Image (cartoon, helix red, strand yellow):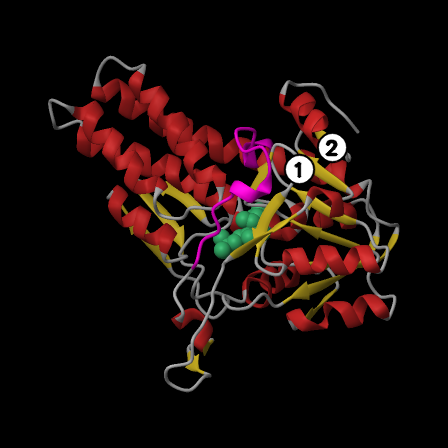
Amino acid sequence: MPSADRIRAIRWEEGQLCLLDQRLLPQQETWLKLSDYRAVAVAIRQMVVRGAPAIGITAAYAMALAVSEAGTQANWQACLLSAADEIKAARPTAVNLAWATDRQLALAQSASTAEQAGAALLQAAHDLLRDDIADNQRMGRYGAELLPVEGGILTHCNTGSLATGGYGTALGVIRAGVSAGKQLHVYVDETRPWLQGARLTAWELQQDGIPFCLNVDGAAAYLMQQGLIHAVIVGADRIAANGDAANKIGTYSLAVLAQYHQIPFYVAAPLSTVDFAMPDGSGIVIEERPAAEVRQCAGHAVVSEGVEVRNPAFDVTPASLIAAIITERGVARPGFQAALQALAAGHMQV
Ligand code: MRU
């Protein structure tokens, strides 16, 4: 098992949710201990915890915290409903956040007392965390089959243990490929403005001893032109029913580049990231984050006063540019609508 499988960013200890503060990595490993769901929603918005599956798991714990607070009120179910709205509003793009919150809400609504709901929601959050790791390991095994026996793999943002319960989605596929004996060299996009690639993916790969190098986002086309990249693999925050996939800003450009250079472009994500209610990517809400994130780099101001900024945090890659979507139940190929539905219905595909 690769050493980085020991990396965990979310844990529950003595009635508190502990989150590894990802804003400070890799320089500092600081854990925040939270016992109020509102503080958890703020932590999600402020990127203490990030990555679609990780914010889903965090939301599940936030709901467990919310039910113990709401439980002191006669109208505890109504209080929980408004807590759920607050948690879901923390970030709009990753569907896992709303998915996990709504699942917890439904569980609470089926309980007869607040105490019963509290115990059920906490257990469900623990289960979600445990199952996410197992699902990622399965996804890794399916995805590893698609990677070349040797070659360069380009990835964007952070999709590893830090972005999930553990092991990772796209990074989990890379881990599984290396564990299976493939000779892979990972090219890590630094991923402006939060530098999830430079700060987080590089940190995880270093601990695993997987060969990699870091490049600026703008280097991707050159690296492909030089013949160094044999596959691109990324995660997703929301996949529409037709396979259009929202992911970290810059992903769409990689998919366009990959098509031009005839390199396969893969998306790895759990089925909880598929939003079957969203027919295509045009309806996906793209989070716009504060301009200050772009005006600075690693805490240092880089532009003069008054410069106007756009800071969309995600973009949508059309399904037509995606060679396969790797899930915990198997691999969906183009004709994604039917393939994803079949996987969700429990039909395995490889
Ligand atoms: O803004 P972030 O860091 O939450 O964005 C994360 C990503 O875009 C990831 O690629 C995605 O959530 C998949 S994580 C397994």
Is there any visible trace of residue 203 in the rendered image? yes
Which quadrant is home to the C terminus? top right
The number of numbered badges drawn on the structure is 2
Mark 1 packing: few (<14 Cα in 10 Å), some, or many (20+)? many
Mark 2 packing: few (<14 Cα in 10 Å), some, or many (20+)? many
Query: Measured from the top left, where is residue 37 in percent x and y?
Result: 27, 42
Q: Amino acid at mark 1?
A: Gly
Q: Is residue 174 found left or right of 273 in the rendered image? A: right
In the rendered image, residue 277 lying in the magenta stretch gets the answer yes
Q: Residue at x 48, y 31 (%)?
A: 128
The secondary element bearing badge 1 is classed as loop
Contact (Cβ within 8 Å) of mark 2 with mark 1 = yes
Q: Is residue 250 found left or right of 257 in the rendered image? A: left
Q: Residue at x 75, y 36 (%)?
A: 142
Query: Measured from the top left, where is residue 45 in percent x and y?
Result: 36, 53
Which numbered disc, 2 or 1, marks the residue that appears first in the sequence? Answer: 1
Which quadrant is home to the N terminus? top right
**Residue 231 higher or lower than 332, as above or below:** below
Q: Which residues are magenta?
A: 271-288
Which residue, given by chain and number where applicable, does mark 1 sit on? 243
